Amino acid sequence: MAINEFPLPDLGEGLTEGEILKWLVAEGDAIELNQPIVEIETAKAAVEIPAKWAGRVVKIHQPEGAVVEVGAPIISIDTGGGSTEPAPSPEGGLIGETTANGRTAVLVGYGPKSGPAKRRVRAGAPVVEKPAAAEPPAPVMEVVEAPLVEEPVVEEPAPVERQGPVLAKPPVRKLARDLGIDLSTVVGTGPQGSITRDDLQAAVAAPETAAAAPAQVAAVGSRETRIPIKGVRKLTAANMVASAFTAPHVTEFLTIDMTRSMRALERLRTQRDWREVRVSPLLLVAKAVLLAIKRYPMINSTWSDATEEIIVKEYINLGIAAATDRGLIVPNIKDAQALSVRQLADAMTELVNVAKSGKTPPADMTGGTFTITNVGVFGVDTGTPILPPGEAAILAFGAVREQPWAHKGKVKLRQVSTLGLSFDHRIVDGELGSKFLRDIGEFLSDPETALLAWT
């Protein structure tokens, strides 16, 4: 028997810790090399960590919900006396090892840090630097005798010693996350000690246990709900504040007749090769942006205080803002300028599906050069979007509505939408921003003619 401790690896993002969301294996399970064993949430995304040995799970050291420091052991694996060498990483070395060229080998899909490095410690969840020692039994609660009233001495029940991960069904785990409760602090009353919804409600309703659990509701009858700021939401907030107070924002609006665009999409859906493809107005907006950037390259640039330069990008990593359960994220399509309309449609569909699943890799959320936010899906006409850090412009696409519109000398019902373009006024002046927005509007007003004239 050869027992090997598997520490939380360096994720290569400049982050020092991660929260264990879900164990994908249990003690006693046989596992294979590179099999996903645990889902970890960082400040960028939720990712699955693969096993670096094949063997049998001997012990799971950290419960779900724990915030673990990089390098702290999370699981022990019996490799059966064979080689205990970790799996090589794509960087050419072992995971976490510094190679001869000075680079640290990391997991697949991780890139450089682009925001604050340190996450806030989750209230009530242990931050582990070394294997946790067994907790001492709960002390006897001292009851002070009030004048003229005698009360019996009451003892708190000793905490349940858990072996392995906390038992709870997925809906219960989701409720715990919504309430901000660390499942490892809750005594389960279900089968085999599993935690039920009633257990969570009892934990929230008991003010004396508030110190032990990261509850959102501080006491019975409270009219406030407290949600921990962490993960994707924390990083997004930091980026937006930094952008809002660094780049001078200007926003312009343009209302356009998209009737011809909507008709073109209907005809496209009837084409044999497009019948199974997700086609939406956002596809034409994205194509219009890509072509307009080609006409006005300065829109696709960044301001560098470090080098005192404006860096114009010759590639377009097109960001599409996506709302997820963990907050707003902006994954981007790399080299979108090189894609055909069909390839762009497929890439956008894949981007949205992966984002909704919560599996967007950190590499897909860095390096964006221009972003589109589709507020129209929420029934909103438009907005004044804040620039993602390092980008010179962002486009808000509003809802497409049937409205009265002057068309060929008559007032008719037409499909109308409003665009909102925010840009960094250090790079983009009013003339450039106005021309860029005007051309996007012209494309969406008559996409077929624009495709023939612009390409």
Image: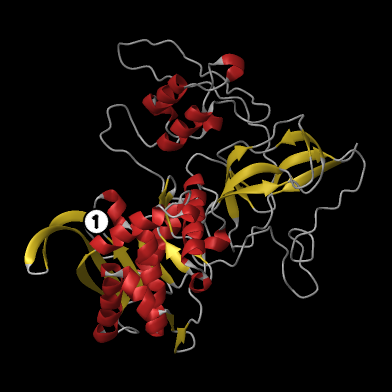
Q: Quadrant of residue 144?
A: top left
Residue placed most toward the observer, 104 or 284: 284
Residue placed most toward the observer, 18 or 441: 441
Label 1, on which residue? 400
**In x, y percent, where is residue 151?**
39, 11
**In x, y percent, where is residue 12?**
64, 62
Mark 1, other Cα within 10 Å: few <14 / some 14–19 / many ≥20: many
Q: Quadrant of residue 266?
A: bottom left
Residue at the far bottom: name it: 308
Quarter of the C terminus within the rendering? bottom left
Q: Residue at x 69, y 44 (%)?
A: 36
Q: Secondary structure at mark 1?
A: loop
Q: Is residue 167 left or right of residue 239?
A: right
Q: Does residue 287 show up?
A: yes
In this rendering, the answer to whether 264 lies above or below 126 is below
Q: Residue at x 58, y 59 (%)?
A: 15
In this rendering, the answer to whether 147 lies above or below 385 is above
Quarter of the N terminus within the rendering? top right
